[in-house]
Image: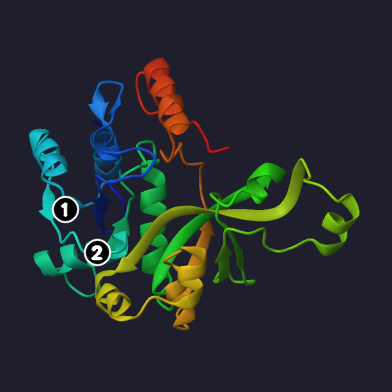
């Protein structure tokens, strides 16, 4: 495996839960002869991270990861979010407060390694932000009105103003005039769910109560904005592959991996 070493040092934690309403046992589902979690782990290794850890509360996932010589940290089953689970990993290993930690979700088997390096590099260079993440252009009207596609707006310097499952900003004149769903839109951004933080921030995050906006939107990054902290958002240097949320996503990923023999680049939407 060719590993491109980044100019910075960072760690990757992959939160992985067995329970899923639409895809039970999702991390262990087979894609091209490997469990999904192994594909995700390999993407993390390709990024050049100095340490990669799968954080799980399920022995079946832990056994499978250990079976391919991956590193596992068993965490509490009481955690409400992946960030809470990562905070436990930080405590377990005693990582330093200024260590950069990348949160790679366990259902992203085709996340480009370059994006892990990008979000970690942004964390290093934006010392006034407690979190960094990525975005991409959103051009399809169907995605704009899809609550499963998270939208965001930023200020002139790229700091997040808000994340939402609703269309933001609302084009009052155009949408009112058209009276229907536009096929194509311009000037919109969708969120890519890849995050970086400094390890010391995570202990602060988990001490905060869930924010009202976070609970309404079911978006944990809104807890950060609610507390008046800053999240820097960069435009992704390349599009991510497909994330696995539905049976349809899984079948698309299986077809793509089988046809390419390696990670493909099937984008969302």
The residue pinned by badge 1 equals 57
Q: CA distance from mark 1 to mark 2?
A: 9 Å
Residue extending furthest bottom? 228
Colour basis: rainbow
**Residue ID at (68%, 55%):** 188
Is residue 236 in view from this perspective? yes
The residue pinned by badge 2 equals 79
Count of numbered badges drawn on the protein: 2
Question: In the image shown, does 86 or 145 lie closer to the viewer?
Answer: 145
**Residue ID at (26%, 38%):** 25
Q: Are marks 1 and 2 in contact (CB under 8 Å)?
A: yes
Residue extending furthest top? 259
Q: Is residue 20 left or right of residue 233?
A: left
**Residue ID at (66%, 50%):** 144
Quarter holding residue 166: bottom right
Question: In the image shown, does 269 or 24 lie closer to the viewer?
Answer: 24
* Residue 87 spot, x, y in % from top left: 22, 67
Image quadrant containing the N terminus: top left
Q: Secondary structure at mark 2?
A: loop
Q: Which mark sits nearer the N-terminus, 1 or 2?
A: 1
Quarter holding residue 96: bottom left
Residue extending furthest front? 21
* Residue 195 spot, x, y in % from top left: 39, 59
Compared with 70, 207 (above or below) is below
* Residue 78, disc: none
Is residue 52 in view from this perspective? no
Other residues around mark 1 within 10 Å, as few (<14) / some (14–19) / many (≥20): many
Q: Secondary structure at mark 1?
A: loop
Image quadrant containing the C terminus: top right
* Residue 174 spot, x, y in % from top left: 86, 56
Question: In the image shown, does 98 or 86 lie closer to the viewer?
Answer: 86
């Amino acid at each position: 495996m060719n590993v491109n070493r980044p100019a910075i040092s960072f760690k990757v934690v992959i939160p992985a839960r067995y329970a899923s309403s639409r895809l039970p046992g999702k991390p262990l589902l087979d894609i091209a002869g490997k469990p999904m979690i192994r594909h995700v782990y390999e993407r993390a290794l390709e990024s050049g991270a100095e340490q990669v850890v799968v954080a799980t509360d399920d022995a079946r996932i832990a056994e499978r990861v250990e079976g391919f010589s991956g590193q596992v940290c068993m965490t509490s089953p009481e955690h409400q979010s992946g960030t809470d689970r990562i905070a436990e990993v930080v405590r377990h290993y005693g990582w330093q407060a200024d260590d950069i930690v990348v949160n790679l979700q366990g259902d992203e088997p085709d996340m480009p390694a370059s994006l892990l390096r990008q979000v970690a590099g942004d964390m290093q260079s934006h010392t006034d932000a407690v979190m960094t993440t990525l975005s991409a252009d959103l051009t399809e009207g169907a995605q704009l009105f899809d609550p499963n596609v998270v939208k965001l707006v930023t200020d002139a310097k790229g700091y997040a103003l808000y994340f939402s499952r609703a269309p933001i900003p609302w084009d009052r004149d155009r949408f009112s005039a058209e009276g229907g769903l536009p096929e194509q839109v311009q000037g919109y951004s969708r969120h890519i769910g890849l995050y970086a933080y400094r390890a010391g921030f995570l202990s602060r995050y988990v001490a905060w109560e869930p924010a009202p906006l976070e609970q309404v939107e079911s978006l944990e990054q809104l807890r950060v904005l609610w507390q008046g902290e800053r999240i820097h958002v960069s435009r992704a240097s390349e599009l991510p592959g497909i994330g696995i949320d539905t049976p349809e996503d899984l079948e698309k990923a299986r077809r793509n991996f089988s046809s390419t023999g390696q990670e493909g680049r099937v984008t969302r939407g």
